[in-house]
Image (cartoon, grey):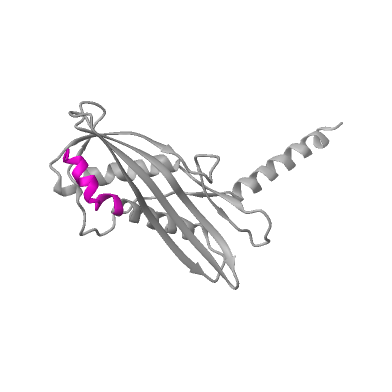
Amino acid sequence: MGFKTKILPVIILLSAAVVVSGCKTVLNLKYEPMPNPGNRLASVSPLKIKLLDFEDKREKAAEPDVIGKKAKKSGGKKADVFSEQPCTEIIKEAIRTELARNGHQIVDNNEDIAIKGEIKECWVTLDPNLDQWDVLSRMDIHLEVINSSTGKSTQLGPYHGGDGEVTFDYPMDAILERALDAALGKLIKHVSSDVYLESALKGK
């Protein structure tokens, strides 16, 4: 077998890999704080807060970086939608940002308060509907606040965030990204305006 004959299957495999990887939808989610006149976090005296694990408790996803499904133009099985980071890290980082921008210090030890979380939903769908495409996103979480001085644990939530968009052209990935970013912003807005979270942070 000549060199050209040997190298041809390798070229075919590499070309197929490029095509497959090029079709993969990978989103880069970003937390953008939303206007929130009902924010309660700034009303709490500055605390040292340790963020513990945020666990992925979603029912839909078998992999941490799978955050949705989208229909194909040709129909058939829906394709996975991926994120550059696991949703647990995305939401945890958003909460870290929101706490810090409201005057609290995020620490690794000697904390006043520890917070852990469970992600129940972090998902986007793209589906055809007659002559349009529907994009829907949803985020749901629960939190647990632990007071280090008293040992008191407070279960909070669920907190929700969601968004939707309709388009008459096959949506680009940027639309899926925008829907999830909006859901994340609304989720954190729900968290930061919760009077029960405010009470837990104050040790009540």
Q: Position of residue 151 (x, y in %)?
A: 23, 29
Magenta-colored span: 190-204
| In the image, residue 106 above or below residue 124 | above
Magenta segment, principal secondary structure? helix
Magenta includes 203? yes
Q: Is residue 99 left or right of residue 28?
A: left
- Residue at the location (56% across, 53% down)? 69
Q: Is residue 105 left or right of residue 135?
A: left
Q: Is residue 168 left or right of residue 153?
A: right
| In the image, residue 1 above or below residue 156 | above
Q: Position of residue 115 (x, y in %)?
A: 29, 36
Query: In the orientation shown, which residue stands out farthest toward the bottom?
Result: 131
Q: Position of residue 33 (x, y in %)?
A: 29, 54
Q: Nearer the viewer, residue 149 or 132?
A: 149
Query: Can you say which quadrant of the picture contains the C terminus?
Result: top left
Query: Can you say which quadrant of the picture contains the N terminus?
Result: top right
Q: Nearer the viewer, residue 84 or 19?
A: 84
